[in-house]
Amino acid sequence: MPNSVYQVVEFVGTSKSSWEDAAKNAIEIARKKYSDLRVATIKELDMTIEGEVVSTFRAKVNISFKFHV
């Protein structure tokens, strides 16, 4: 879109079940604070391990939103 400015913020979403749910959780939280979200880019996926099992999936997500002056 011509003459538009976008800001990018980074969120880390978590989930007990999957990376996809972790990314969706990050977007849902971002939506509560920012409006006019445009693009989300997965920057990194990782997980935490407790004992012998994966305990948490994490998705680092860059989310852009239209900046309104």
Image (cartoon, rainbow, N blue to C red):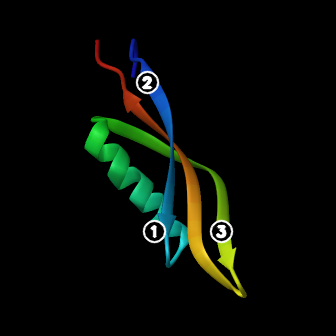
Q: Indicate the secondary structure of the residue bearing disc 2.
A: strand
Of mark 2 and mark 3, the one earlier in the sequence is: 2
Label 2 to label 1: alpha-carbon separation: 25 Å
Q: Give the residue at x 30% y 45%.
A: 31
Of mark 2 and mark 1, the one earlier in the sequence is: 2
- Tell me where residue 24 sits by quadrant: bottom left
Which dot marks residue 65? none
Seen from this angle, which residue lies furthest bottom?
52
Q: Give the residue at x 43% y 24%.
A: 6
Residue identified by numbered label 3? 47
Q: Which is more foreground, mark 2 or mark 1?
A: 1
Q: Which is more foreground, mark 1 or mark 3?
A: 3
Residue identified by numbered label 1? 21
Q: Indicate the secondary structure of the residue bearing disc 3.
A: strand
Q: Residues within 10 Å of mark 2 (few under 14, many from 20)?
A: some
Q: Give the residue at x 54% y 48%.
A: 61
Look at the image and tell me in which quarter the N terminus lies. top left
Q: Residues within 10 Å of mark 1 (few under 14, many from 20)?
A: some
Label 2 to label 3: alpha-carbon separation: 30 Å
Q: Which is more foreground, mark 2 or mark 3?
A: 3
Decide: is 10 above or below 28.
Answer: above
Residue type pointed to by label 1: Asp
Using the image as rendered, state which of residue 5 and residue 62 is in the foreground.
Answer: 62
Of mark 1 and mark 3, the one earlier in the sequence is: 1
Which dot marks residue 6? 2
Whether pointer 2 and pointer 3 mark residues with C-beta atoms closer than 8 Å, the reply is no
Residue type pointed to by label 3: Met
Q: Position of residue 10 (x, y in %)?
A: 52, 40
Using the image as rendered, state which of residue 19 and residue 1 is in the foreground.
Answer: 19
Along the horizontal axis of the image, is 47 left or right of 64?
right
Whether pointer 1 and pointer 3 mark residues with C-beta atoms closer than 8 Å, the reply is no
Look at the image and tell me in which quarter the C terminus lies. top left
